[in-house]
Amino acid sequence: MGYPHPSHPKETVVLSRYFGDAGARSYDGWVQRGGYGALATALGRSREALIEEVKASGLRGRGGAGFPTGLKWSFMPKEVTKPHYLVCNADESEPGTFKDREIMRWTPHALIEGCAVAAYAIGAERCYIYIRGEFTEPWRIMSAAVAEAYAKGALGGNSLGSGQRIDIVLHRGAGAYICGEETAMMNSLEGKRGNPRIKPPFPAVSGVFGMPTTINNVETLAAVPHIINRGAAWYKSLCLGNPKSTGTKLISICGHIQRPGNYEVTMGTPLKEILYDMAGGPKPGRTIKAVIPGGSSVPIMSREEAEAALFDYEGIVEKGSMLGSAGLIVMDDTTDMVYQIWRLARFYAHESCAQCTQCREGTAWTTKVLERILAGKGKQDDFQLLLDLSENMTGKTICVLSDSCAAPVVSGIQKFRGEFEAYMAGAREPAMADV
Ligand SMILES: Cc1cc2nc3c(=O)[nH]c(=O)nc-3n(C[C@H](O)[C@H](O)[C@H](O)COP(=O)(O)O)c2cc1C
Ligand code: SF4
């Protein structure tokens, strides 16, 4: 796989500082760049002090939901009377999202160090890193790095000579999007079918193998050593006006854009700057029509909404969508929005684990109705049918995959209704054969 672009002057390079630097991949290379200092510091502090530091930093989960990380850690039982586990979510399968992959490809020890600090803080001696099955190269790099971390004494029964046991087990998934959902991931780790579990019980009470468990995303955990090294106040200062969203955020940009790739920005950076200055804007002669800002599972933004948004958790919500995984999918004026929404619906129908009726039937039915519209056979009633289906798929199921299918459909109808109408009126050539 290729090299990343040189960083843009408007980026705030923290996690991505060594992307493209192959020397950072080895244990010694990482130590030369200041690596494992945070683990040594952390092992000399109390678990409570570490949790407080992470709480004070304002770090929020980078896997999609933005839950405060220190608070999540504090839910783990204070007394360790049975095994505690940390699970690192490296399943990264959200369409348009490829930031965790780059952390693992270029800075595997950053993730290992973050996992080790977090494991110690929550009273866990073992961390499972669950890697997406298709991540062949990151898997190879992570495997070598974990073996090296054991050989050098950062992992194992006496981590950095502290007497603390910290083990990391890499587990490779089998290619199911749903296994990125935390409770499905726990089932998968246990060797069961990757079906999400009903909550409660929450993982901190009964997680993997029925034991107290914390699950965090790769980017979340990779940020932790920086907080330990430079302090919560420094991390918290990385924000442009909104103290609820702090730190830096890795953003993956793909689609109709001149310079796709990963960019790291301070929370609160105007989305317009990200799209036009950093990523170069649309191809010459084209204009941006729509942006999906958080992977594919969030409402679609119009160009106007995207250009007015600040890129942080609250800023994107204010403009009608969600930050999600921060995978930006950019669509220009050549895009057939009905077709793209159909492709997303088909993805969710394919990836549904099929436990919940609303999701199993709703994702498939939505896909079929969109196919009918694309075949030029849509009726005005289909708008209400799609909206009713979406309503029934939102907030009523075991996990939010179902809601994720509804989000682009509802926002797509609201913002691009004319494109649906054009198919229904026969003003547009059918994009699909008869259904
Ligand atoms: C269908 C579905 C897929 C998900 N996929 C991922 C994923 O690939 N990576 C990830 O970190 N979180 C994913 N999540 C979110 C996780 O369930 C969980 O919230 C996250 O790993 C928690 O880590 P964080 O607090 O550090 O964000 C997914 C959630 C759902 C509902
Ligand atoms: S919402 Fe869909 S993917 Fe989630 S548990 Fe229900 S059927 Fe499975």
Image (cartoon, rainbow, N blue to C red):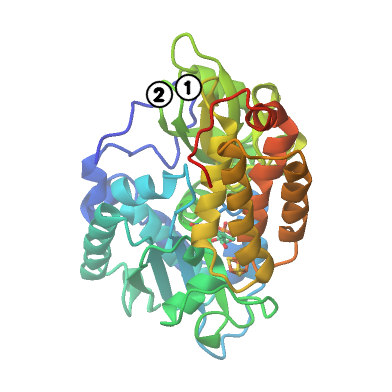
Horizontal side of 362 relative to 144 (left or right) equals: right
Q: Which of marks 2 and 1 is nearer the N terminus?
A: 2
Residue at horizontal 42%, vertical 72%? 127
Q: Nearer the viewer, residue 405 or 218?
A: 405
Where on the picture, by quarter, is residue 273? top right
Whether the residue carrying mark 2 lies under 8 Å from ligand 1 is answered with no
Identify residue type, mark 2. Answer: Arg
Q: In which quarter of the image is ligand 2?
A: bottom right
Q: Furthest-bottom residue in view?
A: 81
* Residue 262 visible in the snapshot: yes
Q: Callout 2 environment at 10 Å: few (<14), some (14 to 19), or many (20+)?
A: some
Label disc, if present, on residue 259 of the rendered structure? 2
Q: Which mark is residue 166?
A: none
> What residue lies at 38% left-to-right and 79% top-to-bottom?
165
- Contact (Cβ within 8 Å) of mark 2 with mark 1: yes
- At 43% from the left and 64% from the top, the residue drawn is 176
Q: Position of residue 318 (x, y in %)?
A: 76, 35
Q: Closer to us: mark 2 or mark 1?
A: 2
Q: Name the residue under label 1.
A: 278
Quadrant, the N terminus: top left
Q: In this view, does 49 lie above or below 76?
A: above
